[in-house]
Amino acid sequence: MSEERYREAAATGVLASEEGHRALLQSVADVARAIFSAKASSIFLLDEATDELVFEAVSGEGEDELVGRRFPSSTGIAGWVLVTRQPLVIDDLHQDPRFARQAAESTGYVPHGLMAVPLLLDEQALGVLEVLDRPNDTSFTVAEMDLLTLFASQAAIGLHLLRRARSARAVLELGEGRAAQVARLATLLESSDDEAVTRLLDALEAVLAGRRH
Amino acid sequence: MSPRLLPAWSLAADAAGGIAIPASWPEQVTREWAIGGATGAGVDVCILDSGVDATHPLVGGVASAVAVTFDGDDVRVEPDELGDVCGHGTVCAGIVRALAPECRLHSVRVLGAGNAGSGELILGGLQHAIAEGHHVVNLSLSTTKRRFAELLHELADNAYFRGAVLVASAHNMPVESYPWRFSSVVSVGSHEGAGALEWYANPTPPVEFFARGVDVDVAWPGGGTMRCTGNSFAAPHVSGLSALILSKHPGLTPFQLKSVLYLTATNTGGAT
């Protein structure tokens, strides 16, 4: 295989991997929610450039509208956990009307109790994993927090891979040369189902394949 | 705090009598000896955290409050007008106050300005707390950045030799974090009991003590309370206990104080 084709493969590999890593994070959020019989679970990624936490995967309440939403990295319960690097359980959040109002405004959902752990990998703090509310308002236990901590390691690896894939993608998208061009085209093609585009691609492939024979 | 002697690097044969240390240790160290009747009076406890809401009824005021900032080059320590920016420091202050009602609380705000620069802020804040001569410094936080570990280690040792007790919350995650792992600090994890005066010495460190950290009703910003669980809430219990011990036995070194905590733990003989 030529060097150029290796580059093309790398470019498309990077694009495909973001999808894979997103699916991994979604799966971690789904399983965390299922294991703790919780109403919702969220994974937040720390965006170092803006010093904000971003909803990266959400399972349960808020699943459809929260992903991508961001807030300052030291605010809210997730912010506590990120800056102190300490896991936390809070019961009866309804007692705090300010929290309830903020939560309702930002997520449309006010939890009763939650568990939150920082997502740490080596010396990096990558984000936070949260699990919200049992169905019958029972409290989370310390043993459950230990279990969530184990999960957090998996989520941290997922976030790490996703971040790497994104920075590789940024390099390709901003870069020059054919590999970068292929990456940009691949991004555009992801959101296109135009039949003319498909025919053009088929023709391009045929031309390129013909030249190789 | 007792007056400090100049550092000595050796001991001459005829000098041993000159450094007799008045040690009024009883034959058996008991809780009654350690904290019986103690209130924390005369002891300065520093909450190195997100600031403290001094108006909260469970906090009962602070003696001083400063904020540490970092502009990318320099760390600055200035009077703090904001109080608590996220609530964590108020929680810790309330726990200390409940145990040691007459101690003097000091707030050093190092959290809450975002995640960036957090290592520099913790270092700067700790340096300030030690320089101020606070007797007990509560650190319900840690950093995972290795480049800060060495500096933190030096600071922790410096505090230890100057007689400042650093109490740090441990965490059970599969990564290294600091400063709780250093032997010159008192590291604290949580037990599931409900007693504020229930603490255990751990025979298998690095976590040295377990204190109450589960379902703790804590001071919540705005004047109310909230039920929380975490090692962040176990460390202030040991900070409060340390204030009690030091108010009854001023001048104990961190080495002696840790020994008293050990000898009077719930799982050792001195608890009764």
Image: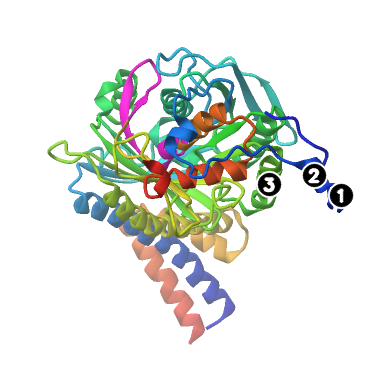
Which label's residue is closer to the chain start, 1 or 3?
Answer: 1
User: What is the chain letter for disc 1?
Assistant: B
Does the stretch in magenta take in B225? Answer: yes
> Residue B194: x percent and y percent?
29, 37
The residue located at (57%, 49%) in the rendering is B178
Whether residue B222 is visible here, answered yes or no, is yes
User: Which residue corresponds to mark 1?
Assistant: B14
Residue B17, numbered circle: 2
Whether residue A128 is visible here, answered yes or no, is no
The picture quadrant where one finds residue A62 is top left
Query: The residue tagged with tag 3: helix, strand or loop?
Result: helix
Residue A179 against residue A60 in the figure, above or below: below
Query: The residue tagged with tag 2: helix, strand or loop?
Result: helix
Residue A210 against residue A169 in the figure, above or below: below
Spot the residue most to the bottom.
A213
Amino acid type, callout 2? Gly
Which label's residue is closer to the chain start, 2 or 3?
Answer: 2
Q: Give the range drawn in magenta.
A: B217-237
The picture quadrant where one finds residue A177 is bottom right
